[in-house]
Image: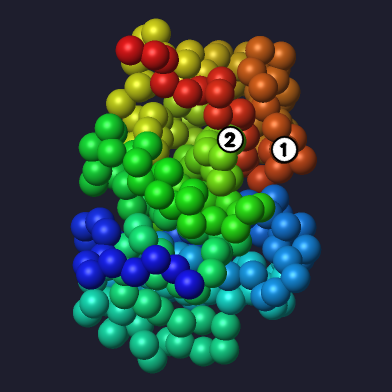
Amino acid sequence: MAPRTTRPVGTATRGTTHPHRLRRMDRWIAAVHGPVLRRAERPPVAVDLGYGAAPWTAVELLARLRTADPRVRVVGVEIDPERVAAAGPYEREGLRFAHGGFEVPVDGRPSLIRAANVLRQYEEDEVAAVWARLCGRLAPDGLLVEGTCDEVGRRHVWVALGPEGPRTVTFATRLGSLERPSDLAERLPKALIHRNVPGEPVHAFLRDFDRAWAAAAPYASLGARQRWIAAAGALAGDWPLVDGRRRRQGEVTVRWEALAPAAP
């Protein structure tokens, strides 16, 4: 049973949401975390934490995760009780909504917690404690995905964390809208967005990605996807990229320790 508190932990978000806003993140989760979901002995539970003023992201998360495992159940969690009430008519088999916050009020330990566009309103020094709290609620092989995207889902950056802490950072974009990789800097999650300054690893990474993108300009005649793949291939010579098969989807994933904020 999830720990209960007298009051949900956290504060309400602006609630902005649009259909398909989190499609890139969802598809990445289904592809990367799908094998773990399928290995679960019981139907795995995924939490859409802070889904906002409308329940679209939770509804879509259920549909996308069920392509990986048809047993998945989704719980949309919102700190605003009026949003929970408004989502009630969308409940169905495998989907329900609950009032709560970072305490994650679900029975047992979820296999996935997705917190998209939730921590942007918090201070940078609050992020580690929120991460630790959410990771502490995960199943032993669970995944926390925390990040930010623009209003229509063209640009995303997210951190993937296990019970032990952060693992990777993924940069994802609709390539046709991209002028240079550093355009994604405005979507860095709270743990990194204020670190995009000289001397910080994430700044160096985006600088090198821009240089690789510029050097791959001849591939533009073959399309933005081929240019992205070529740039990422060059970048992999200096940065620990993982999950290379996803690069065709406009994604690049790098190990967290390579981008973690420099010590003060």
Residue type at mark 2: give it: Thr
Is residue 61 visible in the rendered image? The answer is no
- Mark 1 or mark 2, whichever is nearer to me: 2
In the foreground, 154 or 107:
107
In the foreground, 97 or 52:
97
Is residue 182 visible in the rendered image? The answer is yes
Residue where numbered disc 1 is placed: 243
Residue type at mark 1: give it: Asp
In the rendered view, tell whether residue 140 sits above or below residue 178: below
Instruction: Classify residue 84 by image quadrant.
Output: bottom left
Query: Is 170 situated left or right of 227 in this image?
Result: left
Residue where numbered disc 2 is placed: 168
Q: Spatial distance from mark 1 to mark 2, Cα to Cα? A: 10 Å
The C terminus is located in which quarter? top left
Image spot of residue 1 (x, y percent):
48, 72
- Label 2: which secondary element: strand
CB of mark 1 within 8 Å of CB of mark 2? yes
Instruction: Classify residue 127 by image quadrant.
Output: top left
